[in-house]
Image: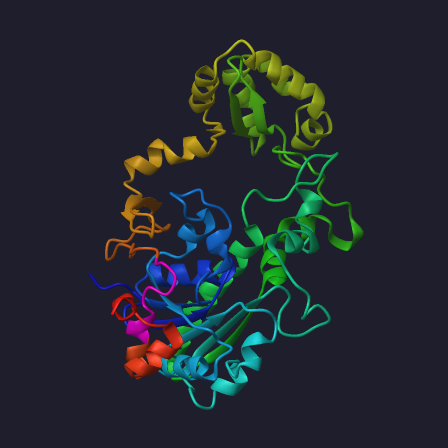
Amino acid sequence: MTLPLQGITVVSLEHAIAAPFCTRQLADLGARVIKVERPGAGDFARAYDQRVKGEASHFVWTNRSKESLALDLKQPEAIAALRCLIAKADVLVQNLAPGAAARMGLGYEALKAEFPRLIVCDISGYGADGPYRDKKAYDLLIQSEAGFLSVTGTAEQPCKSGNSIADIAAGMYAYSNILAALLRRGTTGEGAHIDISMLESLAEWMGFPMYYAFDGAAPPPRAGAAHASIYPYGPFPAGDGGTVMLGLQNEREWKLFCEHVLLDTALAGDERFDANARRNANREALRDIIVRAFCELSTAQVLARLDEAGIANATMNDMAGLWAHPQLAARQRWRQVGSPAGDIPALLPPGRSDRWEARMDPVPHVGQHSRALLREAGLDEAAIDALCGPTAAQQAA
């Protein structure tokens, strides 16, 4: 089985989520990813929590299938060794503090003449220039700057995303841009510089609310888990305490909903509700009608009626429900991967191919591959000892 990125080597000066999520996906497709970490503690995301057998939830998610190289990049000898590895690499990814890579001589401008085929991808909060260039950027701060908080939550209270959506967006655009750069290099022979901004990544995902508020128009209101402008579209309680998600997209579905789910065909012609704009304007009155109908039914009964009518619906799962989701099990999406704490379950990445299955190798411990990688860089054992410290056997002797 040949993976699409087999033979590609990525060196990554990475921490937190955005860059590790990008490079993990490159590793999924077969790239060799060398993750450079601080000696001792490593990537600070390793200490975010201890929810996975003592390991951090963010870290085990974004760092499987990588080799960990622990280097103190304040040492000139460490930089020299790292440059030897970069010389053999196809891609360099970094999401260090703004300007940090350039100060170490590892920016694109310093590398492109020596390594003309190298693809350098810089990931930052706001990009390499502009007035916000040097601002610190964390996921929640970018959610705020990108307007995400203004349209998410309830009328009374804005809410952040329950996952690291700005980091994820930046990681996805870094990943796709690197793939594009590799394709281009295949025809031109040239490397490239990619400048990924978390703000720009999440701003792209805000396209609908931005255009909804075009030319000074009112933005979509915060509507909790309901849709801001389509109704009924969102969560409704069933009589057994469960919650059902449903969504209507057009007038044909509205008539089917009234006939087969609410069992009230006359409601379809009610002038308060006979078009989406009027349903949206009168959503509280319509919600009362729907809740009264559903209160006599179990969650399963409501879902059965919705399925019979061809109305899109879903159960509102919690994390336990997602772990146990029957569709993921039926499609055999779970694998076991190694970690410093032993084997853990992991989802195959999205996209099922008839030509390959994603690589699912272990999550490394800090510096697990340091000595082997430094030998590969051409260092002798004395130089390796100076950078890594003595081995356990040397200490015992």
Q: Nearer the viewer, residue 276 or 11?
A: 11
Residue at position x 48%, y 63% from top? 19
For the stretch drawn in magenta, the main secondary structure is: loop
Q: Is residue 334 visible to us here? A: yes
Q: Nearer the viewer, residue 338 or 324?
A: 338
Q: Is residue 396 left or right of residue 150?
A: left
Residue at position x 41%, y 76% from top? 184
The furthest residue to the right: 216
Residue at position x 56%, y 80% from top? 102
User: Dividing the picture into quarters, in which one does residue 327 lie?
Assistant: top left
Which quarter of the figure is the C terminus placed in?
bottom left
Q: Is residue 271 visible to us here? A: no
Task: Decide whether residue 116 is among the magenta residues.
Answer: no
> Residue 36 location, x and y as percent?
42, 69
Residue at position x 63%, y 53% from top? 207
Which quarter of the figure is the N terminus placed in?
bottom left
As displayed, is residue 397 above or below residue 307?
below
User: Dividing the picture into quarters, in which one does residue 125 lie?
Assistant: bottom right
> Residue 204 location, x and y as percent?
60, 57
Q: Is residue 2 left or right of residue 141?
A: left
As displayed, is residue 272 above or below residue 147?
above
Q: Nearer the viewer, residue 286 or 243?
A: 243
Task: Decide whether residue 367 is among the magenta residues.
Answer: yes
Q: Nearer the viewer, residue 320 or 265?
A: 320
Q: Which residues are magenta?
A: 364-373
> Residue 341 location, x and y as percent?
33, 48
The furthest residue to the left: 1
Q: Is residue 111 left or right of residue 217?
A: left
> Residue 165 location, x and y as percent?
56, 50
